[in-house]
Each structure stands twice: as structure tokens, then as C-alpha cells.
Image (cartoon, rainbow, N blue to C red):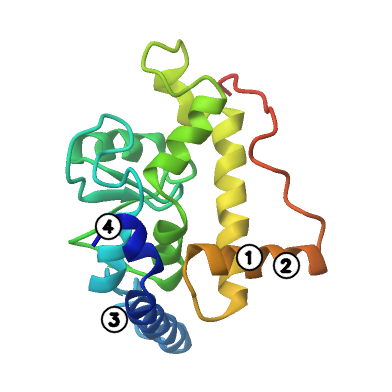
Amino acid sequence: MTALQNMEDPAILRKVAAELQALRSHDSVASSKSTNQHSDGLPFPPTCFQLLRSIHGNCKCVDCGRKNPEWASVTYGVLLCTQCAGKHRSYGVNISRVRSITMDCWSHSQVLAMLEGGNTQLQTFFSRHDMGNEKSRIFDKRYQTKAARFYRNNMERHIANIEQVGEWQGRAASRKCATTQTKQTQKPIPDSRQQVAVTAQ
């Protein structure tokens, strides 16, 4: 099955929706109890992981291209190799929140961020702002730029909107619902293709 078929397969999407609902229920129960047991969520769900791997570009580290990355920046919804995950940790959690796909527990919103993000999506954004090439003078500082902050803020708002929609129906359907809801309740979020300042802060 190809990546595109995975993203649109109704059986896979139903399993993913069920796994996400289980995470949402677990988060609700955990937040209502005073105990901290498993308060960070549950292991990354298997069908969600299958779908995550099928998102374009996710077979390689977003920063260096190493194959089969096992770490993630939840902030950007991207996959990282161990070495690049260490670099992201050094940026601080306000820039990049790093988790292990296999060793950490995950909340509903964190898994949603991974399913709504994607390595190619972020790389395309950086390329539009002349930060996608390693020869770029700002490549090593791109996560500290105003453009990266713009991306982070929009991802955060997008995930909040998706959570309000209800059951996740796949990237295309959920984005359509979230966009409709956003237009009805607030000013539209600026298009990420707008030119923003890319100078390091």
C-alpha cells in the first residue's frame, strides 16, 4: 500500500480515529484524577504510527536526512534522528519539544500534531523562506527565526482547532472542518506562504 493510499484508506482512518479517541478519553480521566500515574498519556498508538510513517518525507530525519528517525519534535510535527533530536533539545522547549516515538508516552494533542505536521511540510515552508538549503547562511539558526515562530504558532492554533472538530477524519477532512470552524468563529489565520521576516532573533 502506498503512502497516499494509507492516508485515504477508510479502514486505517477508522482505526486511527479510535486510537485518538482512546487517547482523548485517557487524557480526560488523567486530568480529573489527582494521581500522576501515566499523566503524560499512552504509548504512541500503532495505527497512528503506521500513518505517521506514511506522511511524505517522514521516512528520513527532517534536518539531516538519516533514515528511519525515531524521535520527534511535537512543536513542528516532524521526525528526527537521535543526533538531531539532541540539537532540538538544546534549543529549549519554547523552540522545540522533543519526544521519543517508542519510549515516551503521548497525549491526544501531541499525536494529532504529528499526524497534522510532516517533514516535507516543514521543509517546504523553510525553502519558501530561503532556509531550506544547508548552504544558506541562516540554516543552522532557522528554528530561532521569526518564520519558525510563525510556523509554531500556526501549528498550535491549528491543533487546537482540530481538537474542537471532534473525531479526526484524516488530514484533508479535518483541515476542511477546522478551516470552516475558524472562519465562523474568528479572523482567518494568515496563509503560511506570506512573506515573513527570517532574521534570527
Amino acid type, residue under disc 2 in the picture: Thr
First of labels 1, 3 by sequence position? 3
Left or right, 15 with respect to 123, comes to left
Cα distance, mark 3 to mark 2? 37 Å
Cα distance, mark 2 to mark 4? 29 Å
First of labels 3, 4 by sequence position? 4
**Residue at 32% over, 59% down:** 52
Label 1 residue SS: helix
Which residue position is annotated with label 1?
176
Mark in the foreground, 1 or 3: 1
User: Do the numbered discs 2 and 1 sit on residues whose CB atoms are within 8 Å?
Assistant: yes
Which residue position is annotated with label 3?
37
Amino acid type, residue under disc 1 in the picture: Lys
User: Do the numbered discs 3 and 2 sit on residues whose CB atoms are within 8 Å?
Assistant: no
- Is residue 142 or residue 97 the one in the foreground? 142
Label 3 residue SS: loop
User: Do the numbered discs 1 and 3 sit on residues whose CB atoms are within 8 Å?
Assistant: no
User: Do the numbered discs 2 and 4 sit on residues whose CB atoms are within 8 Å?
Assistant: no
First of labels 4, 1 by sequence position? 4
Which residue position is annotated with label 2?
180
**Residue at 40% over, 35% down:** 91
Image spot of residue 26 (x, y percent) = 38, 85
Mark in the foreground, 4 or 1: 4
Cα distance, mark 3 to mark 4? 38 Å
Numbered label attached to residue 2: 4
